[in-house]
Amino acid sequence: MSQSLENIAVATRGPLDAVVRVPGSKSITNRVLLIAALADGSSELVGALASDDTRVMRDALADLGVRIREDRAAWHVDGVAGALSAPAEPLVVGNSGTSARFLTAAAALADGPVVIDGNDRMRERPIIDLVDALQALSVPVEILGENGCPPVRVGGGGLPGGEVVVDASRSSQYVSALLLAAPYAARDLTIRFRDGIVVSRPYIDLTLQNMRAFGARAEWTLDGTALRIHAGHPYAARRFAIEPDASAAAYPFCAAAIAGGRVRVENVARDSIQADFALLGVLERMGCGVRRGDDFAEVTGPRGRLAAIDVDMNDFPDAVLALAVVALFADGETRIRNVANLRIKETDRLAALETELRRLGADAQANDDSLTIRPGELRGAEIATYDDHRMAMAFALVGLRVPGVVILDPGCVSKTWPEYFAALRETVDPRNGNRQAGSRRRGTFRSVAAAKRQEALKWRASAQTAGHPPSATSRAASRSRRVA
């Protein structure tokens, strides 16, 4: 394991006054990459996210015989009309959950066996529920790892179709994986759910929306209890614009809630169905001002203290980490419920949140599917990131209000937003100068110039298992870079 070159000390700053552009959606990018790869013809993907997760998806698709070219305007994907080529070597997807799950189902369409593997943490993230579903559909697939986790070998040869019951109680990605491959099944596919349980349902709706945009026929049944995908309606190549990432937008929204002032995220369609935009309603309940326009969303910090909240975040669990740090500044106990699947993400996020929130002085308690946060006397601390991009991005926001917050191994943000800390540094850098009242700083939190991208990427950490790395105040003092 290599060590990141620098840690980052976050400077306090506020109130904010920013207009923001966040990078393209990771969830959409990896979905439409696979869709375009399976399509007939050449697709043009505009606004795609360049990050670790999308890189491993691109590399895997290239190994499966898909040609992908990139220019300044777009990514160009030459589809293979559903005919993937089996690679000679395993597909290694790091810790990208979307890549591992989506490719496992798509590998059924290959002309030979395909092995999907990942890093140490991926080998701890279960895939058995997807494998069970594929086996029930007569796809030759076996788990090579332990405890129902990757690596996985898929025999290829085609997806028969039919009807299957999926255990979707832990991840909606198992369902999306089946959906994405299903237009190339030999016959219609119907997906039902064990005990009627589906977590993170909006992500399934996002998958359906992307599929239909490329010509597939797929929908919920009239009673909303099952999904039906029609065979004989394959994907057709097209030009497709990828929305900004709602999960990334959570951090500038929450920055306004914590530091005060206002932050507007541009190019956000009012009718976007990305799940994490539901966070706006939660922040509004906590006392923030929220405005939506046709192409923006804006959050204004509260006039007084933030209100504590009790909230079910099953539909948008990726936003839990950002909301958890906002809860540090609330006027009482906040409870986040129905998020058991956080334990099988990039790290056990419930355990990690409990540990790091306590390190900052809060009373935090995680159980099987919830997190309770009671604010305390907050203090600076070195924050472990567990090789989890969302831990790094969320806890950096605490430093806007609390002096002495140091983010360890910040390079993990390259998973979804390589330029995050360069953008945050722009936001809080006092050298940007004073501005007239009412003026706004434009460009904060945005992707910056190539030189800054390289600077951010040098912080990239290699795969790291859960746990707090060795810590020393002297090391932090000598190796930390201030974000201001």
Image (tube, rainbow, N blue to C red):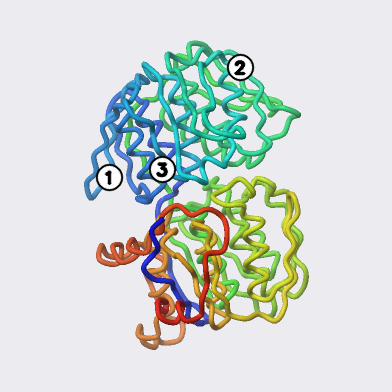
Which residue is tagged 3? Answer: 29
Q: Earlier in the sequence, mark 1 or mark 3?
A: 3
Which amino acid type is shown beneath numbered disc 3? Thr
Q: Nearer the viewer, mark 1 or mark 2?
A: 2
Image quadrant assignment for residue 158 = top left
Left or right position of 159 against 337: left
Tell me the SS state at disc 1: loop
Residue 440 in sight here: no
Of marks 1 and 2, which one's residue comes earlier in the chain?
A: 1
Q: Quadrant of the C terminus?
A: bottom left
Dot 3 crowding, Cα within 10 Å, few <14, some 14–19, many 20+: many
Which class describes the residues within 10 Å of circle 1: few (<14), some (14-19), or many (20+)?
Answer: some
Q: Circle 1 sits on which residue? A: 74
Q: Quadrant of the N terminus?
A: bottom left
Which residue is denoted by mark 2 in the rendering? 136
**Is the C-beta separation of discs 1 and 2 under 8 Å?**
no
Observer-side mark, 1 or 3, equals 3
The quarter of the displayed image where residue 478 is located: bottom left
